[in-house]
Each structure stands twice: as C-alpha cells, then as structure tokens.
Image (cartoon, grey):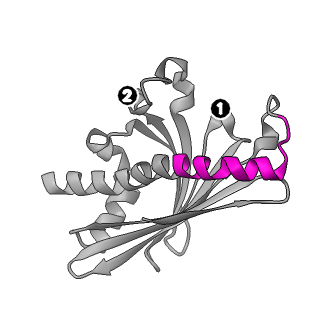
Amino acid sequence: MAPAVAALTLSGEVVIEFTFVETVPRARPLLFRTLRDRVEELVPHMKNAVGITERSRGVDARGVVTREAIWRGAPEEVPALIRPMVRPEALVWVETTRWDERDWTCEWTIRLPVMAEVFTARGRNAFLAEGEGSRVEMAGEFSVHPEALPSVPTLPPALVRTVVPPLERFVVALLDPNLKEAVRAARRFLDQE
C-alpha cells in the first residue's frame, strides 16, 4: 500500500487519495469477470459483507458493463466499542461500477445512503496480467464534506490540518481491507471451484 495523501480544499473538504495493490494467482480475464459477473457469489468468502444485491446492470455497444449494487456490511466488523451505536442502515453502501474489458479496468463510486452528502469515494481498479496471474492496482479518493454535517461548526484551516492526519490513518485503515477483500474473496472462491 502506498501512503495516502490528504489534502484540504478551499471549501474545507478533506480529500484522501490512496493506492493499494493485490496479486492473485489467477488469469486476468477469469479474475476480472468473476468480480464483475459473480460478486454476489463471493459473499460467503468475505469478512466485511453479509449481502450484495444487484440493483441494475447494463451493457453498452462496446461491451462496457455498468452495475449498481447495494452492499450490506458485517456488523461484527464494526469495532466493539461503537457497535451498539451503529444502526444497521449505517452498514449499507451503494457501489456503482463501470467494467471495461478493452483496457481491463473498473471505475467505481461508493456512497453511503445515510450520509451521502458527507462522504464520497471513487476510484479505478486496473487489472494487469502478471505471469500466469493478475495484479490489481486500486487507486481512489475518499472525500469528507464537513459542511454537510449540520451539527459541526466550520473549523479554522489550522485546526482542520491537525485533524487530517489521524482521520487519514483511520480512513486508510478502514479502506485497505475493505477494497482488497473482494479481490481476496474472489481468490478464495476460485480456489474452491
């Protein structure tokens, strides 16, 4: 994992950029298509999700597949200290993906319905052939929009800069296993086939 880079925008938004890499000893087309077309079957192999429901799917004339899926997170993955305060609807996120086999990429966005205005995440996964296996390079950004929280006062930039490093570490620690988990689940799933 490359170090995350956090930035404070003029509007007070905190943007955290990140990159992760995962290798899988499976051919690129098989891994790519498993994650695109069979992700719901991966749930039993995931630690962070208890359900995935495809809400829409489309294929354009170039063969690019777009999907929207609702993910339900595993309550046991929430730290025990805060678990009693986390409502089930807070463990739901909507993932929109665009899968393009012409360049073996997946562009994605994630939004949390309960806080859609507060947090946004987007990125791109590149699937590279590596020997007989695959290397998945995940790059994206996670944005926090504090102005969307009505109960949070506007903080002076100097104070926000002191809050960003711990927030950055927390977000990267949260995103790292979650983004890699689908790829790892695909590996476990394919190992059993």
- Closer to us: 11 or 71: 11
Q: Position of residue 15 (x, y in %)?
A: 68, 57
Circle 2 Cα neighbour tier, 10 Å, few/some/many (<14 / 14–19 / ≥20)? few
Which part of the image, by quadrant, shows the C terminus?
A: bottom left
Taking the image as shown, residue 159 lies to the left or right of residue 60, namely: right
Going 22% across and 82% down the picture, which residue do you hit?
131
* Mark nearer the viewer, 1 or 2: 2
Magenta stretch containing residue 191, yes or no?
Answer: no
Q: Main secondary structure of the magenta part?
A: helix
Q: Which residues are magenta?
A: 153-171
Magenta stretch containing residue 164, yes or no?
Answer: yes
Determine whether 134 is above or below 155 in the image.
below
Q: Position of residue 90 (x, y in %)?
A: 56, 29
- Closer to us: 166 or 75: 166
Going 31% across and 43% down the picture, which residue do you hit?
46
Quarter where residue 35 is shown: bottom left
Taking the image as shown, residue 88 lies to the left or right of residue 12, namely: left
Determine whether 14 is above or below 92 in the image.
below
Three-letter code for the amino acid on which mark 1 is drawn? Val
Circle 1 Cα neighbour tier, 10 Å, few/some/many (<14 / 14–19 / ≥20)? some
Q: Is residue 110 visible?
A: no
Instruction: Classify mark 2: helix, strand or loop.
Output: helix
Three-letter code for the amino acid on which mark 2 is drawn? Glu
Q: Earlier in the sequence, mark 1 or mark 2?
A: 2
Q: Which mark is residue 41?
A: none
Q: Which mark is residue 114?
A: 1
